[in-house]
Structures are given as C-alpha cells and as structure tokens.
Amino acid sequence: MATVLVTRPQPEADRTAAAVAALGHDVLVDPLMTIQDLDVALPPPQAVQAILVTSVNGVRALTRLGGDRTLPPYACPLYAVGDRTAAAARDLGFIQVRSAAGDVGDLVRLVAAEAQVDGGLLLHAAGEDVAGDPAGALAAQGFATRRLALYRAVAADALLPGIRDALAAGTVSHVLLFSPRSARTFVNLAVRNGIDLTAVSALCLSPAVAGALGEGDGGSPFRHVAVAAHPDQAALLDLLALAPGV
C-alpha cells in the first residue's frame, strides 16, 4: 500500500482522505488552499435563467451569499460541471439540478442544448481563478452571461510541518492534485524547501492540472505523472491502482 498526500481545500480534503483510506492506503492531508468569500451582490432572481457552477466551492459560496441559510438564493435550474458538484447543490437545497458529468466543455454543450438564448442571464458562480470559461463560451453562442467571482482561494505560503518532513524523508509515494493552482503551489513550496520529488507520483484530475506541474527541458520533477480518465474523484483514485509504488 502507498502513502498518499491529498491536496485540496477543506472539507473536500477530509472526504477524499476517507476514500483513499478505505482503499487501504495511508493518508496525509495538506489543503494548500483556504476558501474566502468575497463581498459581492447577486443579480436579482428574476433576471437569472440558470446558474452554472464548476466547483463545490461555488455552490457553497452562492448559498452563503444568498442570505437565508435554509434556502438557496435561486429557484432556477442549476447546471453543475460534474456529479459531485451536482450532489452538493442538491444537499444545499437546489431542486432543479443538472449534471454535465464531465468537464467545462461538457457543461457548455449541456447548457447550450437546454437553455434559451433570449431566456435571461446565465450566471457562472465562480471563484477568482477559474480553469475554464463557460460564460465566455456561451456568450459566443449568443447567450447573455456573467461570471461572478463569489470566493477566492488563498494559497498557503508553506507546507504543513508534518507534510514537509514526510516529503523530505521520502515517505510520500503519491500526491493527488485537483487544480492547476494547487499543483503549482505544491511544486513551488516543495522546491522552496529543497524537497526531491523524484520518488513521488503526481496523480492529476485533468490535463490542465498536469500541465501546471512545471515540466521543462529537464523533464518532470516527479517519478511519474498520470491524468485521470475522467475529471472526477473516482477516476483519480483509479490511478492509485496503476501508479508505480502501490
């Protein structure tokens, strides 16, 4: 079995850690990012045709900013990039939830097929940093869209001491990376601490995450880099059975 480092904001980090532990692996957690809500005004409900969300954090921030913690701020359809985000929206009270079960491209295709060009605003509830731009893609097709940054992810300025020591000692065999920014943060902090990553396999949620690892002329700093077949946690965990060192 492997020692796996989970890098994602809480509370998702603990849920992923539990799933990894259930596979029989040892687990370490360093969230690398802290989520902070931004003080923004939401558009009036009557102006919004549908909500687009590309992360669980977007759903949570949208609900918190709605004011009434017992109800979501909009009764219109909510389109989620994947099943986990869709499940979080349902848990938070959204009723009309559709999952694209894929990536941003799948989300754009689903919304374009079901929304009305003249039906009102398509609101992308997002963070300050996004890996894709569904609002822009749909605007190019004639829809009225708006990307509203509801939260920011603040990167850690240091690895947690226990994580730094485990990496330096070579006891971490795999790191799970869920976003391009967390991937860059992890590599930068490891380099700053003089940590050799050549014994670590980097398991990435998407090609964009793998592309953020800073591979240059000298090759990858990792022993092995793999990308999930589908951009969800289940596919990412499937890589653990295939990666070297398990």
Image (cartoon, rainbow, N blue to C red):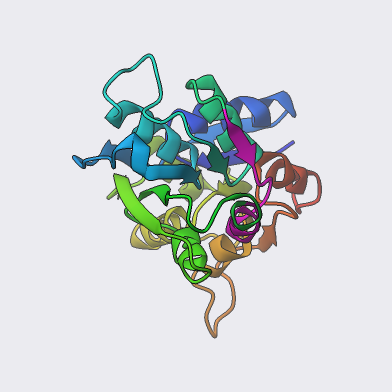
Q: Residue furthest top?
A: 70
Number of numbered discs overlaid on the protein picture: 0
- Where is the N terminus found, in terms of image quarters? top right
Q: Residue furthest right?
A: 242
Q: Residue at x 57, y 50 (%)?
A: 115
Q: Is residue 94 magenta?
A: no
Q: Residue at x 53, y 69 (%)?
A: 141
The answer to whether residue 32 of the structure is visible from this angle is no
Rendering coords of residue 61 (x, y %)? 35, 34
Residue span colored magenta: 96-110
Rendering coords of residue 132 (x, y %)? 49, 62
Q: Is residue 197 above or below residue 168?
A: below
- Give the quadrant of residue 90: top right
The answer to which of 15 and 112 lies nearer the viewer is 112
Rendering coords of residue 221 (x, y %)? 55, 68
Q: Residue at x 68, y 59 (%)?
A: 227
Q: Is residue 105 magenta?
A: yes
For residue 14, side relative to residue 147 (left or right): right
Q: Is residue 215 above or below residue 38?
A: below
For residue 75, side relative to residue 209 (left or right): left
The answer to whether residue 78 of the structure is visible from this angle is yes
The answer to which of 35 and 184 lies nearer the viewer is 35
Q: Residue at x 56, y 42 (%)?
A: 79
